[in-house]
Image: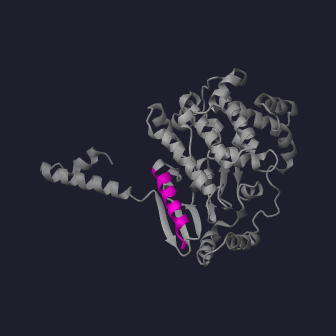
């Protein structure tokens, strides 16, 4: 509602009255938007975190990251809180990622908070990965990027038939961050390399069969599951696992269906074991099967620089711990903010939506080793510290 609509019906009032009405209208509109972006509640034995921006698919901004981090630290110290449950409001998404458009705008404008965003997001990812109490995420609905970061490092991830998982960053001129360099290489075979480089989407039961989720439950059972978890008296990891296992076992949806990539896994394992992106591309070309050509087409749309940075991130991450991976990823995030492709990817995919990014460098062979090495270089005193 613009000011013109507010003014039209009240033009016969004096200006004082008119001002009052406008102020009241602004208060009303800000009031309807003033629902907290994240709900932090103590229920039974648990601290329950609800990401509460359903219109924005619960994407994370810096204030949500700060609130969640501080509350998690507090609950970690409290003896009466023995479990954390993380979920998303609205039923459509658990969390579709970080607020990438806002990050790109701020990065272009060289705003200081942008460095803080990645620092604080990765600090939260690490806090979840090292948390001293059982941490359960209900990854119901869209779970991408930053949403993966606030779930996958916890002990338990419960997928439903509505879960849609992806790490689509290479299409945006980024890399699969939020600890992707840690968890992706640890998925079965070379599955994580494939998911990280192509942005391939896993849905429903496949999210659990691929090893991203630990359990699979019908979405209409989530409320009951939560109640059963909240009813536990100072639960241990084992107690929580028992409850989750019992729900998982009862859920028969797609139980006997093979993993969506099962027939391709041998090929994926051999194609993506190459140490360069050029070799992976060659493997796909040489194979020539419909599935290989589909992946080839997808990878050729991605930022060449992102592909090279991401492959190296995954190879290096496979032998680093989570803390070391996040320090490496922070360096990469700053390299992307200094570069061209991230802003161009956001423009093409999210802003103008012409789906036609002009990457620089435009070809894989133009992305030099020097360029990639530069992205991984220490930032000295600006490195991420925990």
**Residue 307 in the image, given as x and y percentages of width and height:** 69, 33
Q: Residue at x 81, y 38 (%)?
A: 272
**Residue 193 to residue 17: above or below:** above
Looking at the image, residue 243 sits to the left or right of residue 81; the answer is right
46 part of magenta stretch: no
Segment tinted magenta in the rendering: 63-80
Give the image location of residue 167, x and y in percent. Answer: 66, 45
Identity of the residue furthest to the front in this view: 381
Tell me where residue 131 sits by quadrant.
bottom right
Q: Is residue 327 above or below residue 95?
A: above
Answer left or right for 198 relative to 340: right
Residue 46 placement: quadrant: bottom right
**Outermost residue toward the left in this view:** 14
User: Magenta span: helix, strand or loop, mainly?
Assistant: helix
In this picture the colour scheme is one colour
Q: Is residue 73 magenta?
A: yes
In the picture, measured across the screen, residue 143 lies left or right of residue 287, that is left
> Residue at horizontal 66%, vertical 44%?
324
Q: Nearer the viewer, residue 310 or 237?
A: 237
Task: Look at the image and tell me whether residue 89 can be seen.
Answer: no
Q: Is residue 342 left or right of residue 303?
A: left
Whether residue 62 appears in this view of the structure is yes
Q: Position of residue 20 (x, y in %)?
A: 19, 54
Q: Does residue 162 sit above or below 361 in this rendering?
A: below
Q: Nearer the viewer, residue 216 or 231?
A: 231
């Amino acid at each position: 509602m613009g000011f013109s609509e507010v003014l039209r019906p009240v033009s016969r009032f004096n200006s004082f009255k008119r001002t009052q009405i406008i102020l009241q209208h602004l208060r009303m509109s800000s009031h309807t938007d003033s629902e907290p972006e994240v709900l932090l509640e103590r229920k039974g034995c648990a601290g329950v975190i609800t990401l509460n921006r359903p219109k924005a698919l619960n994407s994370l901004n810096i204030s949500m990251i700060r609130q969640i981090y501080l509350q998690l630290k507090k609950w970690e110290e409290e003896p009466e809180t023995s479990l954390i449950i993380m979920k998303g409001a609205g039923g459509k998404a658990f969390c579709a990622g970080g607020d990438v458009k806002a990050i790109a705008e701020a990065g272009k404008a060289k705003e200081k908070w942008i460095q803080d965003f990645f620092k604080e997001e990765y600090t939260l990812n690490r806090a979840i990965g090292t948390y001293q109490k059982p941490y359960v995420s209900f990854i119901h609905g869209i779970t991408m990027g930053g949403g993966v970061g606030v779930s996958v490092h916890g002990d338990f991830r419960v997928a439903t038939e509505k879960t849609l998982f992806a790490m689509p960053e290479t299409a945006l001129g980024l890399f699969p961050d939020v600890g992707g360099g840690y968890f992706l290489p640890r998925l079965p075979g070379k599955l994580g390399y494939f998911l990280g480089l192509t942005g391939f989407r896993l849905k429903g039961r496949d999210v659990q069969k691929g090893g991203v989720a630990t359990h699979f439950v019908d979405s209409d059972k989530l409320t009951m599951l939560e109640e059963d978890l909240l009813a536990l008296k100072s639960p241990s990891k084992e107690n929580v696992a028992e409850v989750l296992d019992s729900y998982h076992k009862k859920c028969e949806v797609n139980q006997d269906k093979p993993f969506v990539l099962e027939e391709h896994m041998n090929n994926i394992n051999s194609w993506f074991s190459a140490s360069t992106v050029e070799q992976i591309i060659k493997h796909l070309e040489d194979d020539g099967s419909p599935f290989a050509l589909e992946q080839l087409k997808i990878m050729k749309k991605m930022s060449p620089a992102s592909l090279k940075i991401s492959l190296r991130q995954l190879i290096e991450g496979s032998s680093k711990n989570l803390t070391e991976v996040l320090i490496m990823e922070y360096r990469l995030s700053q390299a992307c903010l200094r570069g061209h492709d991230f802003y161009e990817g956001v423009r093409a995919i999210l802003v103008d939506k012409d789906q036609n990014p002009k990457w620089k460098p435009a070809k894989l062979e133009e992305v030099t080793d020097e360029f990639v090495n530069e992205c991984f270089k220490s930032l000295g005193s600006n490195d991420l510290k925990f």
